Image: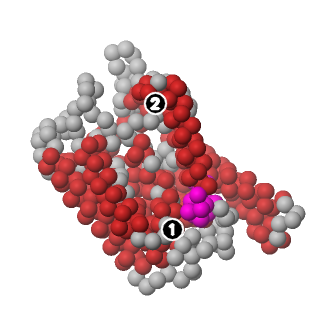
């Protein structure tokens, strides 16, 4: 993987004429596909906690966490954490970050259009803007055709229907792609407010700070190596301070929401206690990735599963296609996977949580031949139907309901 600089990019400096029209056409195609899939799944839907059978599109996309975001839109956040019969903290709004419902609420104050209209519009608008930024980001490492194919991979991904429902994913994707672009072109100070906003959309501050730390250490190493080309050493030396400051801002932004929850509720672990209410157990870094498969296949087989995941991840980052995406995007993907390994509890929502690994779409797009267009993308659309029908759609699987998307 190569370093971070304007001069280090591979894509040509000039953008093709009407590139934005082409990108938005790909994005619209992706949303039309997702809309058809959502409509088909809605027609197959039986009665659920949110609606009767065969709900309309607007009702169907407001399932699951959309309801929590709407509750924040209408009520805000509780100053006292709710508790169950055992005295443990129960499910509440503090698990969901405020930027998306706050933006919808601000637009509602101006337009009066309400959640049902504004929330999907904000999600789609943010996703469309994100597709443009993703293209510009991919162009730093590739030509027009490859970057456009990468956008298609993102727009038709198995979980891409999430980009048009009232979730924070599309807004977070826009801010994440924007922050990565600014870092990739060396505009570290401009990235700081974007990172601060991003950390109020989804909990991505920790992996972003880790990524910046990797870039900081890389710049420091290059700047201190006497055998390095003098021009490159000077460039790296200029990056050290702004990267350090960006890392500090990212780290502070990462803890901002837990600190706000503490200040409002008076409970220091308000955010963590709320998050773990969905798990039903205390946060234990790394261990769920062994315990989850061990509960199904036993400890010995679980050890093999974990070893396979580690070897597969190592092989992924050694692959030429992944190395070609560059240091910034590679460091982000590595930091995000490390964050998931440390803090995420493997479950059915894991597929949705992998969306921030969108830079890997560029690696996929660099594969030679027509494999992506004629094989991978149709398979991706089929997987999207399965994701929407099996996970977004409600099918009771036991006393606790269904698996979340």
Residue projecting furthest to the right: 226
The residue that appears at 11% across and 42% down in the rendered structure is 53
Residue linked to disc 2 = 293
The residue that appears at 40% across and 76% down in the rendered structure is 20
Start-end of magenta stretch: 319-332
The residue tagged with tag 2: helix, strand or loop?
helix
Measuring from the top left, give residue 150's x and y in whole percent. 45, 66
Q: Disc 2 versus disc 1: distance between alpha carbons?
A: 33 Å
The residue tagged with tag 1: helix, strand or loop?
loop
Is residue 144 visible from the viewing direction of this image?
A: yes
Measuring from the top left, give residue 324's x and y in whole percent. 59, 65
Residue projecting furthest to the top: 86
Q: Is residue 184 left or right of residue 375?
A: right
The residue that appears at 44% across and 60% down in the rendered structure is 174
* Structural crowding at the residue carrying mark 1, measured as other residues with C-alpha within 10 Å and reported as few (<14), some (14–19) or many (≥20): many
User: For this rendering, which residue is in front, 71 or 300?
Assistant: 300
User: For this rendering, which residue is in front, 197 or 305?
Assistant: 305
Quadrant for residue 396, please give it: top left
Residue linked to disc 1 = 366
The reply to whether callout 2 and callout 1 are in contact (CB within 8 Å) is: no
Quarter of the image with the N terminus is bottom right
Residue projecting furthest to the bottom: 17
Is 262 included in the stretch rendered in magenta?
A: no
């Amino acid at each position: 993987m190569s370093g971070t600089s304007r001069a280090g990019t591979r894509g040509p400096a000039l953008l093709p004429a009407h590139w934005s029209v082409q990108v938005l056409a790909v994005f619209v195609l992706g949303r039309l596909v997702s809309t058809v899939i959502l409509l088909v799944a809605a027609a197959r839907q039986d009665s659920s906690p949110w609606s009767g059978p065969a709900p309309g599109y607007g009702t169907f996309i407001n399932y699951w966490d959309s309801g929590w975001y709407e509750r924040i839109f209408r009520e805000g956040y509780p100053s006292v954490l709710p508790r169950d019969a055992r005295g443990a903290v129960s499910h509440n709004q503090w698990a969901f970050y405020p930027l998306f419902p706050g933006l919808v609420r601000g637009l509602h104050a101006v337009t009066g259009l309400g959640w049902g209209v504004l929330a999907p519009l904000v999600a789609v608008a943010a996703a469309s803007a994100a597709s443009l930024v993703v293209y510009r980001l991919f162009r730093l490492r590739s030509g027009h055709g490859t970057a456009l194919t990468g956008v298609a991979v993102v727009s038709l991904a198995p979980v891409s229907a999430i980009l048009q429902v009232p979730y924070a994913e599309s807004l977070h994707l826009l801010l994440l792609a924007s922050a990565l672009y600014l870092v990739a072109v060396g505009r570290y100070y401009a990235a700081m407010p974007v990172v601060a906003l991003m950390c109020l959309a989804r909990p991505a501050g920790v992996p972003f700070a880790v990524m910046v730390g990797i870039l900081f250490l890389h710049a420091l190493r290059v700047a201190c190596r006497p055998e390095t080309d003098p021009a490159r050493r000077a460039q790296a030396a200029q990056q050290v301070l702004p990267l350090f400051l960006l890392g500090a801002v990212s780290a502070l932004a990462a803890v901002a929401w837990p600190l706000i929850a503490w200040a409002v509720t008076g409970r220091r672990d308000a955010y963590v206690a709320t998050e773990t209410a969905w798990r039903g157990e205390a946060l234990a870094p790394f261990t769920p990735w062994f315990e989850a498969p061990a509960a199904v296949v036993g400890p010995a087989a679980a050890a093999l599963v974990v070893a396979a995941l580690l070897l597969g991840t190592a092989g992924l980052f050694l692959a030429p296609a992944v190395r070609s995406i560059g240091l910034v995007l590679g460091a982000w993907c590595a930091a995000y996977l490390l964050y998931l390994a440390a803090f995420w509890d493997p479950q059915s929502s894991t597929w949705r949580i992998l969306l921030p690994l969108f830079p890997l779409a560029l690696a996929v797009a660099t594969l030679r031949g027509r494999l992506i267009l004629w094989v991978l993308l149709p398979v991706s659309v089929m997987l999207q139907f399965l994701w929407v029908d099996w996970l977004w759609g409600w099918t009771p699987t036991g006393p606790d309901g269904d698996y979340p998307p």
